[in-house]
C-alpha cells in the first residue's frame, strides 16, 4: 500500500523526522537500472520510451538524455525506486500525482495540500493509506483531504 | 508579447507584461522552455531564465531583475527558490512577462494570472 502524509506548509517538511528524499532532481541521478513500473511511468507522464540508463525516446520520437524527463516524472520514479524513503511530491503536477497514486502500490509520499483536488487523469482506483485510513478511490481521498479530518 | 525569432524550435510568448503561473501539470515543457532560453546567448539581453541551481551558484536574481530591462523572465522550479523579492517581481512585471513554475499556491504573488504552455516538435508557445 502507498503511504501518504499530507502537509499544509512545505517549510515544516524536514520537521517530520522522516527518512526523506526532498529533491528528486538530485536523487534521480543515482538510480541505475529502473524497474518496469518506472518505465510505465515514463510512458504515462512524459509520453516517452525508456531506452537505457542514459537515454529516452521523447514524445516526438527523438532520442534525448534521460535527464530531460520532467521533474514530476523523476519524482514518480523515485517513489518506485526508493520504496523505503519518503518522497516529497511538491514539484509534481496534478497529472503526475495521479500517475503515482494509480500506479504505485507501495512506497511513501508527502503531498502538499494546495487546495486543488487530485484529478482522475489516468484513473480513479487507488490503494493508499492517509493518516492510518485506507482509500480505494481518489474522490474519497480528495474529500478527506478537503475536509481536513 | 515575446518572440525569440528562431527558425528552429522557436519560442513564442503570447502574453502582455505581468506575472503568470503555469498550469499545475507535469511534462508540459516548462523546464525545456527554461533550458532553451538559458542556452541561447542571442537572447541574453532580452531574457532572464533562472532555476534553483543558478541560485546555488550565487546568482543574485533580485539585482539582475532590478538592473535589467528584460522582456521575459522565467523562474523554473520556483518552489525550491528562496530569497526572491516579490516586490522586485511586481515592479519588473510592468515591463516584463514573468513566467513562474510554482505549485505552492501560498507562494504566489498577489495579482498573478494563469498561463498555459504548449510544446511541439517545432517550438513552445505560452498563452492565456
Image (cartoon, rainbow, N blue to C red):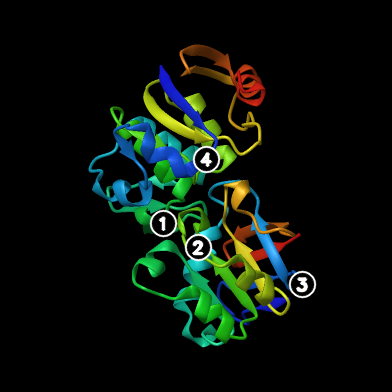
Asked if the residue under mark 1 is in contact with the one under mark 3, i.e. CB atoms within 8 Å, the reply is: no
Answer left or right for A11 relative to B46. Answer: left
> Which residue position holds label 4?
A9
Q: Residues within 10 Å of mark 1 (few under 14, many from 20)?
A: some
Tell me the element at label 3. Answer: loop
Which picture quadrant has residue A75?
A: top left
Q: Residues within 10 Å of mark 4 (few under 14, many from 20)?
A: few
Query: Is residue B1 visible in this depiction of the protein?
Result: yes
Instruction: Tell me residue A91's x, y (percent).
Output: 49, 46
Judge depth for marks 2 and 3 and give the one in front: 3
Instruction: Tell me residue A83's x, y (percent).
Output: 31, 28
If the image is split into quadrants, where does the C terminus of chain B sit?
bottom right
> Which residue position holds label 1?
A68
The disc, 1 or 4, on the residue closer to the chain's N-terminal end is 4
Q: Residues within 10 Å of mark 2 (few under 14, many from 20)?
A: some
Residue A25, compared with residue A7, is above or below; it is below
Which picture quadrant has residue A86?
A: top left
Tell me the element at label 2. Answer: helix
Q: Total label count?
A: 4
Instruction: Tell me residue B64's x, y (percent).
Output: 51, 81
Asked if the residue under mark 3 is in contact with the one under mark 2, i.e. CB atoms within 8 Å, the reply is: no
Residue A39, compared with residue A125, is above or below; it is below
Answer left or right for B32 relative to B23. Answer: left
Q: What is the number of the mark on residue B16? A: 3
The residue under the point 57% across, 47% down is: B104
Asked if the residue under mark 1 is in contact with the one under mark 2, i.e. CB atoms within 8 Å, the reply is: yes
Tell me the element at label 4. Answer: loop
The residue under the point 32% across, 31% down is: A18
The disc, 2 or 3, on the residue closer to the chain's N-terminal end is 3
> Which residue position holds label 2?
B32
The front one of A98 and A41 is A98
Amino acid at each position: 500500500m502507498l503511504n501518504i502524509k499530507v502537509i499544509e506548509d512545505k517549510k515544516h517538511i524536514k520537521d517530520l523526522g522522516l527518512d526523506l528524499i526532498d529533491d528528486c532532481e538530485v536523487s534521480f541521478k543515482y538510480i541505475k537500472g529502473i524497474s518496469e513500473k518506472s518505465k510505465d511511468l515514463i510512458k504515462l507522464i512524459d509520453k516517452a520510451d525508456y531506452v537505457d540508463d542514459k537515454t529516452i525516446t521523447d514524445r516526438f520520437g527523438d532520442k534525448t538524455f534521460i535527464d530531460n524527463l520532467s521533474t514530476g516524472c523523476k519524482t514518480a520514479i523515485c517513489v518506485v525506486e526508493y520504496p523505503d524513503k519518503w518522497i516529497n511530491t511538491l514539484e509534481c503536477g496534478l497529472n503526475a500525482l495521479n500517475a503515482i497514486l494509480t500506479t504505485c502500490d507501495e512506497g511513501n509520499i508527502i503531498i502538499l495540500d494546495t487546495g486543488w483536488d487530485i484529478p482522475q487523469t489516468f484513473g480513479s482506483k487507488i490503494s493508499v493509506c492517509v493518516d492510518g485510513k485506507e482509500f480505494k478511490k481518489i474522490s474519497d481521498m480528495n474529500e478527506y483531504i478537503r475536509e481536513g479530518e | 508579447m515575446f518572440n525569440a525569432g528562431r527558425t528552429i524550435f522557436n519560442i513564442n510568448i503570447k502574453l502582455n507584461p505581468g506575472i503568470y503561473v503555469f498550469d499545475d501539470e507535469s511534462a508540459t515543457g516548462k523546464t525545456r522552455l527554461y533550458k532553451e532560453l538559458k542556452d541561447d546567448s542571442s537572447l541574453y539581453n532580452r531574457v532572464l531564465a533562472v532555476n534553483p541551481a543558478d541560485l546555488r551558484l550565487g546568482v543574485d536574481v533580485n539585482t539582475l531583475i532590478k538592473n535589467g530591462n528584460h522582456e521575459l523572465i522565467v523562474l523554473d522550479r520556483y518552489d525550491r527558490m528562496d530569497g526572491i523579492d516579490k516586490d522586485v517581481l511586481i515592479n519588473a512585471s510592468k515591463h516584463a512577462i514573468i513566467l513562474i513554475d510554482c505549485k505552492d499556491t501560498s507562494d504566489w504573488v498577489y495579482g498573478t494570472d494563469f498561463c498555459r504552455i504548449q510544446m511541439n516538435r517545432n517550438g513552445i508557445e505560452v498563452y492565456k
